[in-house]
Image (cartoon, helix red, strand yellow):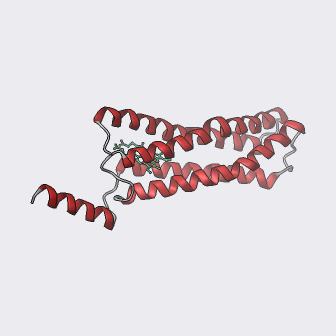
Amino acid sequence: MIMTPRLRKFALTAHVVSSVGWLGAVAGFLVLAVAGLTSQDAQMVRAAYLAMELITWFVIVPLSLASLLTGLVQSLGTTWGLSRHYWVVAKLLLTVLATAILLVHTQPISYVARVAAETTLSSADLRGLRIQLVADAGAALLVLLVTTTLSVYKPRGMTPYGRRKQHEQRTVSQP
Ligand code: HEM
């Protein structure tokens, strides 16, 4: 069902706010993950991991799900469709992948936050896991930059299904 222009603008606002908000929240998470890994100040390390857990559960996870949901509405409620253009298919795959990996990684984030709350982390404690949090946040930021760029540039290139649909529509409108 194609949305009316007014509804489309409202839905697009929700989509851009949730998607680009997700990118911003991940950038904040990355800064905290680097501070938690490199700071010599025990209070800073504890605060960083506690804040990372809060940001994950109350900002990043809700925004990622909202971005996926509003992206589906944008695709299905406009002529862009879900499988007509390669850029939309690529965004869908990247977003689903990023959301799934994020949900899996909520466990290590909560674990490090719990340990940081109960003990004083030295720079050697849970080092591998803390490095992994930095690497994951960096990779997520890269993926979100790619999806944002795809959204703005909307590269041409239609899938075979999209070309067929376009051809059908042209034949219907010019009998
Ligand atoms: C991290 C994920 C995402 C980001 C950062 C993102 C970002 C954006 C941005 C900034 C726009 C506005 C572009 C413009 O108006 O010029 C947009 C539009 C759009 N997005 Fe997303 N998006 C994401 C996920 C998705 C997903 C998962 C889908 C589809 C399944 C999707 C489908 C669309 C469509 C169809 C439009 C065009 C809407 C229109 O012109 O009416 N997006 N996206």
User: Residue 96 versus residue 46: which sits nearer the camera?
Assistant: 96
User: Residue 149 versus residue 124: which sits nearer the camera?
Assistant: 149
Name the quadrant containing residue 54: top right
Q: Measuring 52% from the left and 37% from the top, which residue is drawn there?
A: 21
Q: Measuring 47% from the left and 54% from the top, which residue is drawn there?
A: 92
Residue 28, position in %: x, y?
62, 38
Q: Quadrant of the N terminus?
A: top left
Residue 56, position in %: x, y?
66, 40
Name the quadrant containing residue 118: top right
- Left or right: residue 44 versus residue 166 is right
Give the total number of marks visible in the rendering: 0
- Left or right: residue 33 versus residue 7 is right
Residue 150, position in %: x, y?
41, 52
User: Residue 26 versus residue 86: which sits nearer the camera?
Assistant: 86
Q: Measuring 76% from the left and 36% from the top, which residue is drawn there?
A: 50
- Left or right: residue 86 versus residue 124 is left
Name the quadrant containing residue 88: bottom left
Q: Quadrant of the C terminus?
A: bottom left
Residue furthest front in the image: 1
Residue 62, position in %: x, y?
59, 39
Residue furthest bottom in the image: 160
Q: Measuring 50% from the left and 46% from the top, which residue is drawn there?
A: 68
Residue furthest right in the image: 119
